[in-house]
Image (cartoon, grey):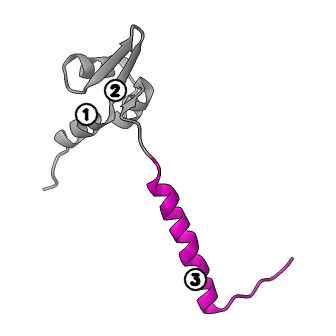
Amino acid sequence: MEVICLEDKAFHALLDEVMARVREQSSSVVLDKWISGSEAMQMLRITSKTTLSYLRNEGKIRYSQPQKKIILYDRASIEAYLEKNAKDTF
């Protein structure tokens, strides 16, 4: 086993560099505007496709149907639905 010794300043400089790289990579992650039904169900914390279709049919969340069997859901409308139904604490 090899032991590596670093001075305090060098250690903190190394940590700063690592943190900068992590921030750079995490800021480059772009979320898709349109998500699949399974992703929508995961965001809403539901397990029933029937509940998802109810929310869609009642106009509570936006969707797009580019092909007959493909239904995509608007991520922003799901987030807005969750915010609208959030309850404030007492």
Q: Determine which residue is flagged by label 3.
A: 13
Tell whether position 26 is magenta. yes
Of all residues shown, which one is farthest toward the right? 1
Count residues near mark 3 (Cα–Cα under 10 Å), then give few for <14, some for 14-19, many for 20+.
few
- The front one of 51 and 56 is 56
Vertical order, 74 against 20 (above or below): above
Q: What element carries label 3?
A: helix
What's the mark number on residue 31? none
Is 58 displayed left or right of 69 in the figure? left
- The front one of 25 and 60 is 25
Of all residues shown, which one is farthest toward the left? 90
Count residues near mark 2 (Cα–Cα under 10 Å), then give few for <14, some for 14-19, many for 20+.
many
The reply to whether callout 3 and callout 1 are in contact (CB within 8 Å) is no
Count residues near mark 1 (Cα–Cα under 10 Å), then give few for <14, some for 14-19, many for 20+.
some
The reply to whether callout 2 and callout 3 are in contact (CB within 8 Å) is no
Q: Determine which residue is flagged by label 2.
A: 73
At 47% across and 52% down in the image, what residue appears? 28
Q: Could you tell me the amino acid type at mark 1?
A: Ser
Quarter-wise, where is residue 18 in the image? bottom right
Q: Could you tell me the amino acid type at mark 2?
A: Tyr
Q: Determine which residue is flagged by label 1.
A: 77
Which portion, as a residue range, is magenta?
A: 1-29
Quarter-wise, where is residue 48 in the image? top left
How far across and down, in percent of the image, does residue 30 sit?
43, 45
Vertical order, 41 against 26 (above or below): above
The reply to whether callout 1 and callout 2 are in contact (CB within 8 Å) is yes
Quadrant where the C terminus is found in the figure:
bottom left
How far across and down, in percent of the image, does residue 24 sit?
49, 61
Vertical order, 57 against 43 (above or below): above
